[in-house]
Image: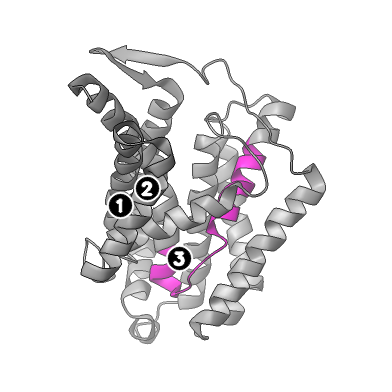
Amino acid sequence: MTLTVFLQALVSGILIGGVYALIGIGLTIIFGVMRVTNFAHGDLMMVGMYLTYFLFTLAKIDPFVSILITIPCMFLFGAFLQKTVINRILGSLAQNQILLTIGLGLIMSNTVMLAFTSDYKILTTSYSSSSISLGGISISQPLAVSFAITVVITSVLYWFLMKTDTGQAIRATAQDREAAQLMGINVKRMSIIAFGIGTSLAGTAGALISPTYYVFPQVGSAFTLKAFVITVLGGMGSVVGATLGGIIIGVVESVGAVAISSEWKDVLVFGIFLVVLLVRPSGLMGRSRM
């Protein structure tokens, strides 16, 4: 592998890793605040992809512009799910949470399949195959725009969590739910907001990858597993860790596909997952924190 090819794979990995980070951050916020292992996270991303697809095909709204609609819609959808379904299993056994969220994901994917069939849908824009040449390295235009939007969203989210009263209340709930409640924080409201934010981040990630991925009802399952690898690698409950984990997984996939084979990239990712579980179960960023 030449240096140019390696740099090409590295840049591509960082760009797709940014979107992976967005998926992982959504999952880690939900786990950090609510201690719920959400196996429906990939299916929430799938709903965001379909929303983006129909906004593009029916209303002619660009996928990257459509996030202005996708983010609030998915936030409300997540808040509704938390209030009506997820709230009922807070504090229950982990296996109950896993079974419920798996069932929730199956309901979403099968409902979409019944409504729109299982056919693959392609969201083709004028820039879907466009690329920018920089120093001999070809950079995918949609992935570059997706990465830039991801950086902006992550920065705004970090500011929100660190500087606003609501963000600090969410962090306090994540650190110690009972202590936060004793301090007068409405932890139920924080849980609704946290699940809404996590859902909107998953939906936004779906919108950002729509121009480069097929849209179909089962697309979420692969991303659910990937989101868990990212959050475990970075440290469950850590926003910074999820960002780092997403970039690492993106780079490993991209470089591994070029250096070995594209068929081995998932093997490498899950190999890292097993190594992290064995060597550092708390993840790269240590114990849970936001």
Residue type highlighted by circle 1: Gly
Task: Mark 3: give few (<14), some (14-19) or many (20+) Cα within 10 Å.
Answer: many
Along the line of sight, which residue is nearer the eye, 147 or 43? 43
Question: Where is residue 226 shown, x and y percent of the image?
Answer: 44, 53
Bounds of the magenta span?
29-52
Vertically, is 166 above or below 146?
Answer: below
Q: Please tell me which of labels 2 and 1 falls first in the chain.
A: 2
Residue 49 sits inside the magenta stretch: yes
Residue at (70% x, 34% y) in the render: 54
Q: How many marks?
A: 3
The residue beneath circle 1 is: 245
Q: Please tell me which of labels 1 and 3 falls first in the chain.
A: 3
Q: Disc 2 vs disc 3: which is toward the camera? A: 2
How far, Cα to Cα, is label 1 from label 3? Answer: 17 Å
Task: Mark 2: give few (<14), some (14-19) or many (20+) Cα within 10 Å.
Answer: many
Residue type highlighted by circle 3: Ile
Question: Where is residue 36 shown, x and y percent of the image?
Answer: 48, 73
In the picture, the disc for residue 30 is 3
Q: Which residue in the rendered view is the most extreme toward the left?
A: 3
Magenta segment, prevailing SS (helix, strand or loop): helix
How far, Cα to Cα, is label 2 from label 3? Answer: 14 Å
Query: Badges 2 and 1: C-beta atoms under 8 Å apart?
Result: yes
Along the line of sight, which residue is nearer the eye, 20 or 6? 6
- Look at the image and tell me in which quarter the N terminus lies: top left
Please indicate, yes or no, whether residue 172 appears anywhere in the rendered image: yes
Question: Where is residue 187 shown, x and y percent of the image?
Answer: 45, 77
Residue at (20% x, 22% y) in the render: 2
The residue beneath circle 2 is: 21
Q: Disc 1 vs disc 3: which is toward the camera? A: 1
